[in-house]
Image: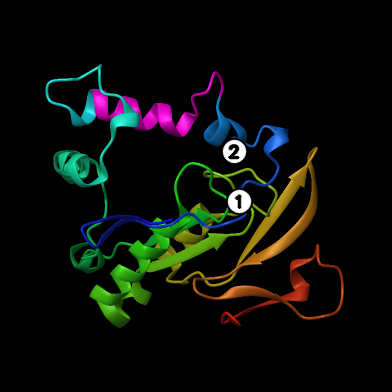
Amino acid sequence: MAKRSRGRTLHPAWPVGAEIDMRSGSGWGAWIGGSNGVSTEAHMAESFFQYMVAVPPDPSFNLSKFNVDRDSARLGFAHDVIDATDPDLSAFERRGGKLILAHGWADQSLNPMMSIRYYEQVRERMGAATDRFLRFYMVPGMFHCGGGVGTALFDTFGAVIGWVERGKAPGRMAGARVENGKTVRTRPLCPYPEEARYKGKGSTDDQENFVCAAPSR
């Protein structure tokens, strides 16, 4: 459920189904269930309010007492200092900057919808110029910054070097899943909002049997 206050969405709802593979140390178990009745999510949120939001620090702050209408307003200073949410990247673009964003659909730490929302805000603000400096990739099955059950190994560093030094804008990128040092699956990672679509023939573990296409839904 999205977090709303006085009719305004503060935080997007979390996608359904990313709790996969909790028993194998994915981080979802600790993040949601935790130990001794305290999840990682709750612990981080509470300590954030205690020592980063409160001035002076307030170690007595209890997350169970959080009021979305009253306490969200206290986040203003932290938002200004920490968050990178300004969609106006015109200065970055004028200086020749190139940016590749990637987020795992199964991220157990940061809601993937936040990155989607930011990218769409940039496109709304920057228009067609966005394609000159920004590419965005959503990675199915990837946990927080890597790992997971998908093809979470891909070369964004090489892609941005090629873009800056040779003028080759990245399109489809190869993603791989490696187990015990062996590549067991490859899939294309497609520039958002495109998604990988199976051609209907060949192994589903081979990226050559997929195309990048506009979402069907």
Colouring used for the render: rainbow
Q: Residue at x 57, y 70 (%)?
A: 190
Residue 214 percent location from the top left of the image:
56, 82
Q: In the picture shown, does residue 4 fall above or below 207?
A: above
**Dot 2 alpha-carbon crowd within 10 angstroms: few under 14, some 14 to 19, many 20 or more:** many
Q: Is residue 89 magenta?
A: no
**Dot 1 alpha-carbon crowd within 10 angstroms: few under 14, some 14 to 19, many 20 or more:** some
Q: Between disc 1 and disc 2, whose residue precedes?
A: 1
Q: Which mark is residue 18?
A: 1
Q: Quadrant of the C terminus?
A: bottom right
Q: Which mark is residue 28?
A: 2
Q: Quadrant of residue 90?
A: bottom left
Residue 106 percent location from the top left of the image:
58, 51
Mark 1 in CB contact with mark 2 (< 8 angstroms): yes
Q: In the picture shown, does residue 39 fall above or below 83?
A: above
Which range of residues does the magenta coloring cover?
Answer: 35-50
